[in-house]
Image (cartoon, rainbow, N blue to C red):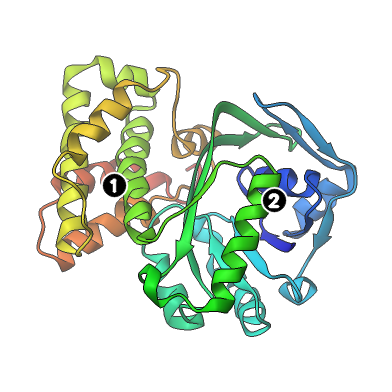
């Protein structure tokens, strides 16, 4: 399968490298600095085994990805505007776009601009980062993808269904645990609920999830954040089970206590934060739906001075 990957960072580089190693025709669209760095090859250091692509296929513009059946979008949310014209070119050229972004609000814009037959829903669960050499480092064994067509299963046209089948086969060959879901927006919200609370608390406290969990006050604040997120999701018509809040807390309790969020790592490294697309979007949606979100507003205020990187 001919696959494009927009971004060759910690997420796009990881999944793209696995697909390329499995024999898929993968091309990475990257910024100039990453383009130059990858002339030396793409390195992945993983608990599942290291890999090295000596000569990854690289592109500097969306036009160079024309002909791809599927394009994975794996940039930070704050870089999405910068690749929007590339996405337009690719969608008009027949590619199906699969965003692996944090957050949920980008789906409204993608569907509005490119149409439901050119956009899939999707999210990934993975803990990766770039080290000082530009290598991708995976620090836990989680590397799951969920994806699917928008709408319900009865409205997917046959052409898109065939693309989904081939993409599932490609993920399988690459040993990527990927699951197709009919109600993909609900699956994306499940990740968003977890990530917004998890990233907000670990970044605001500058600590691992184990430290957050051990302290009663921070553990209860995390619980309230989950409550705010679930209330907004239900106000927007997302069907989350009554037991979902308990499930989120149990999930956190079972995490490696040394685990932290990419937002926390970005904060420590002085990089921009995905604050507006996570906590900021939750605040905006809460206001639209008249749902109270005081904890998110506080977390946002604590982190807002660092949203564009080190001050």
Look at 65% across and 66% down and name the residue there: 70
* Image height of 50 relative to 85, above or below: above
Q: Is residue 130 left or right of residue 127?
A: right
State the residue position of label 2: 8
From the top left corner, tell me how far across and down residue 189 is, in percent. Answer: 32, 53
Given this view, does label 2 or label 1 mark the residue nearer the observer?
2
Q: Is residue 40 above or below residue 147?
A: above
Q: Position of residue 229 (x, y in %)?
A: 22, 49
Dot 1 falls on a residue whose secondary structure is: helix
Q: Is residue 148 left or right of residue 233?
A: right
**Along the line of sight, the residue nearer the viewer: 19 or 233:** 19
In the image, residue 142 sits, relative to residue 164, either above or below, namely above
Q: Examine the image and state in which quarter residue 244 appears.
A: top left
In the image shown, does 156 or 233 lie closer to the viewer?
A: 156
- Report whether 276 appears left or right of 239: right
215 and 174: which one is in front?
A: 174
In the structure shown, which secondary structural element does the residue marked by tag 2 occupy? loop
Which residue carries the number 1 mark? 300
CA gap between label 2 and label 1 equals 28 Å
Q: Residues within 10 Å of mark 1 (few under 14, many from 20)?
A: many
In the image, is 295 to the left or to the right of 121? Answer: left
Q: Position of residue 302 (x, y in %)?
A: 29, 41
Q: Check whether the beta carbons of the residues at disc 2 and disc 1 lie within 8 A of each other.
A: no
- Residue drawn 19% across the image and 64% down it: 237
Question: In the rendered image, is residue 211 in sight?
Answer: yes
């Amino acid at each position: 399968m001919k696959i494009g990957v927009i971004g060759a960072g910690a997420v796009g580089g990881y999944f793209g490298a696995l697909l390329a190693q499995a024999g898929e025709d993968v091309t990475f669209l990257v910024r100039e600095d990453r383009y130059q760095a990858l002339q030396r090859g793409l390195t992945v250091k993983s608990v599942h085994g290291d890999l090295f692509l000596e000569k990854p296929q690289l592109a500097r513009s969306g036009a160079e990805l024309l002909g791809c059946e599927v394009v994975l979008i794996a940039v930070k949310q704050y870089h999405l505007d910068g690749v929007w014209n590339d996405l337009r070119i690719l969608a008009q050229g027949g590619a199906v776009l699969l965003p692996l972004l944090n957050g949920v609000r980008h789906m409204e814009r993608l569907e509005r601009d490119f149409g439901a037959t050119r956009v899939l829903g999707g999210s990934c669960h993975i803990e990766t980062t770039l080290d000082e050499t530009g290598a991708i480092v995976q620090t836990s064994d989680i590397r799951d993808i969920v994806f699917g067509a928008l709408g319900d299963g009865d409205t997917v046209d046959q052409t898109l269904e065939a693309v989904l089948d081939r993409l599932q086969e490609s993920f399988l060959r690459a040993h990527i645990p990927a699951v197709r879901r009919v109600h993909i927006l609900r699956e994306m919200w499940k990740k968003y609920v977890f990530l917004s609370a998890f990233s907000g608390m670990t970044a605001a406290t500058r600590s691992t999830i184990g430290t957050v969990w051990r302290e009663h006050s921070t553990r209860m604040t995390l619980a309230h954040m989950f409550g705010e997120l679930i209330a907004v999701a239900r106000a927007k018509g997302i069907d989350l089970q009554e037991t979902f809040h308990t499930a989120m807390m149990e999930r956190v309790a079972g995490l490696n206590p040394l685990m932290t969020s990419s937002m926390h790592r970005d904060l420590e490294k002085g990089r921009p934060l995905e604050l507006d697309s996570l906590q900021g979007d939750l605040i905006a949606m809460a206001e639209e739906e008249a749902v109270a979100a005081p904890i998110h507003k506080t977390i946002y205020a604590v982190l807002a001075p660092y949203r564009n990187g080190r001050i």
